[in-house]
């Protein structure tokens, strides 16, 4: 009896571990890969996530491009937004691949395509073969541009930011042969230009941020002579005007906010899709003694335990540390975000400055992004930050704020316009270098570059995925 009971307990324990394991790792045939989206090419590059060998380049993710563009030209409103995306966020190029995730069976790749304002599920086998009919499912946005996505920990739900509709949509991720693949499920409210989406480790919460109208001017919260880099008094032969150093900056916060729109960081309850908490980070920074920083949260990194979150902000050359459980600094409900009052918890605890190397004025920052791309190692010890306008990747010690930069001087490789980082296998950081058409692989422990991979035109999002090994042999 004792032996039988022991066997039963052991079997139940093993069953509980199996039930809790992510479905993504269920098939032994799946090969771990790095999937790189080359935004301006409309292609993917596929890299072996362990050997770092580039397996495929130029995998077409817009086989229906001509048909899609023809449809856009039939609708004047869609056409106007198409050109706005091209000459705004796209810097004169179509934005064809923003984000990507593989399905649990590894046979489909979900792709958000900004200029086409859709999300599609691509048959990977057909795409690798160059087939023109690789699109399995297409879902059009309510608005006119798609952006960042997010995948639930169990791989069943996909979030897609609908850039111009102030909303985020949830889809059934599915897989090959699943009739529900791409089915639209629910929507939650965002601010102006929904952007980043991250799930909590257990999938019960969603961390989301909107970035405002990055394509419009009004990049300063206050104006002073020092903030007008386009006017060089020395070049005009005027030198220094006596007394101008005594003039206080002119605060234009309300004007700035009206132009840029609602820029909110919010936590969403996954079970109800209701907003649990919502902050305006510019105001939280002011309360903490850091005035005149934009409210727009860019990429974020969530520390183990999910109490501390690290943000990149528009125009900020550095990082913000936010404690979601700390008491509100001034103890007052000082603002509201739509119908949601300022939470009684949540406070900025630190701003970590990083080097500002660019000499360009704010108005020429790509989509307001001083830095865009942030991740953290699984131990929560080191942050990997893309210094977009400064042409470096910074490895930042979370405890001390000390950092080391990887750039052409320190690695011998061009680190032009880094635009994304994510934690890869083997305790590594994967960083897309969009102007260099490359991806750098960096060791979180040593801070050293392990590989520098040639991919495609303007690599943007980099994701870990799994694909049947037989498709890549």
Image: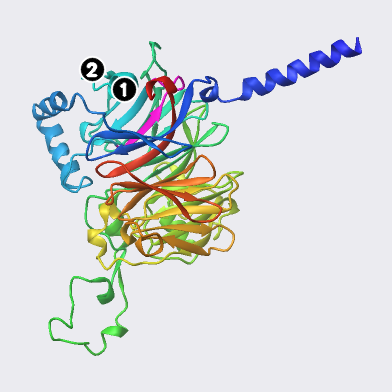
Q: Which residue is mark 2?
A: 133
- The residue at 38%/40% (across/down) is 462
Front residue (pair 296, 1): 1
- The residue at 74%/21% (across/down) is 13
Q: Is residue 411 above or below residue 108?
A: below
Q: Which residues are magenta?
A: 98-107
Across and down, in percent, residue 223 comes to: 27, 70
Q: Quadrant of the N terminus?
A: top right
In the image, farthest residue toward the bottom: 242
**What kind of secondary structure does the magenta stretch mostly adopt?**
loop
Across and down, in percent, residue 450 comes to: 46, 50
Q: Is residue 88 above or below residue 396?
A: above
Query: Callout 1: helix, strand or loop?
Result: strand
| Visual colour scheme | rainbow
Q: Quadrant of the C terminus?
A: top left
Q: Is residue 33 visible?
A: yes
Across and down, in percent, residue 163 comes to: 29, 38
Q: Which residue is mark 1?
A: 122
Front residue (pair 343, 467): 467
Query: Callout 2: helix, strand or loop?
Result: loop
Please tell me how crowded label 2 is: few (under 14), some (14-19), or many (20+) other residues with Cα within 10 Å. Answer: few
In the image, farthest residue toward the right: 1
Tell me the quarter of the picture where residue 180 sits. Answer: top left
Q: Is residue 161 visible?
A: no
Q: Earlier in the sequence, mark 2 or mark 1?
A: 1
Q: Is residue 406 above or below residue 76?
A: below
- The residue at 80%/17% (across/down) is 9
Across and down, in percent, residue 315 comes to: 34, 59
């Amino acid at each position: 009896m004792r032996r039988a009971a022991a066997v039963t307990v052991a079997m139940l324990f093993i069953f509980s571990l199996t039930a809790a394991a992510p479905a993504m790792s269920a098939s032994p045939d799946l090969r771990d890969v790095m999937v790189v989206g080359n935004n301006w090419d409309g292609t993917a590059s596929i890299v072996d996530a362990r050997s770092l060998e580039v397996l495929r380049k130029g995998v077409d993710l817009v086989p229906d491009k001509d048909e899609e563009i023809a449809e856009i030209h039939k609708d004047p409103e869609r056409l106007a937004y198409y050109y706005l995306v091209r000459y705004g966020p796209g810097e004169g190029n179509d934005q064809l691949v923003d984000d990507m995730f593989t399905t649990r069976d590894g046979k489909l790749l979900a792709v958000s395509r900004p200029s086409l304002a859709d999300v599609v599920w691509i048959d990977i086998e057909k795409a690798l073969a160059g087939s023109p009919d690789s699109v399995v499912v297409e879902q059009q946005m309510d608005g006119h541009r798609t952006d960042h996505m997010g995948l639930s920990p169990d791989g069943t739900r996909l979030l897609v930011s609908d850039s111009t509709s102030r909303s985020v949509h949830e889809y059934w991720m599915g897989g090959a042969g699943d009739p529900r693949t791409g089915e639209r499920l629910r929507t939650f409210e965002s601010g102006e230009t929904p952007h980043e989406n991250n799930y909590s480790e257990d999938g019960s919460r969603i961390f989301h941020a909107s970035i405002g109208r990055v394509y419009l001017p009004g990049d300063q919260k206050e104006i002073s002579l020092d903030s007008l880099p386009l006017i060089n008094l020395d070049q005009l032969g005027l030198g220094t005007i006596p007394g101008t150093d005594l003039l206080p900056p002119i605060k234009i916060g309300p004007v700035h906010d009206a132009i840029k729109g609602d820029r909110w960081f919010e936590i969403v309850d996954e079970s109800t899709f209701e907003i649990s908490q919502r902050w305006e980070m510019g105001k939280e920074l002011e309360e903490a003694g850091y005035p005149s920083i934009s409210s727009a949260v860019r990429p974020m990194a969530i520390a183990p335990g999910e109490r501390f979150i690290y943000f990149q902000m528009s125009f900020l050359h550095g990082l913000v540390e936010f404690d979601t459980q700390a008491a509100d600094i001034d103890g007052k409900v000082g603002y509201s975000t739509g119908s949601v009052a300022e939470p009684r918890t949540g406070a900025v605890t630190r701003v970590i400055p990083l080097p500002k190397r660019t000499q360009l004025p704010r108005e020429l920052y790509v989509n307001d992004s001083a830095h865009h791309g942030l991740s953290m190692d699984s131990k929560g010890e080191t942050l990997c930050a893309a210094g977009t306008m400064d042409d470096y990747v910074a490895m930042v010690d979370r405890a001390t704020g000390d950092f080391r930069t990887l750039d052409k001087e320190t690695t011998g490789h061009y680190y032009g316009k880094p635009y994304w980082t994510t934690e890869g296998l083997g305790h590594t950081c994967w960083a897309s270098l969009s102007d260099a058409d490359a991806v750098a692989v960096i060791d979180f422990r040593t801070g050293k570059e392990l590989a520098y991979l040639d991919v495609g035109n303007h690599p943007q999002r980099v994701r870990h995925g799994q694909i049947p090994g037989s498709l890549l042999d």
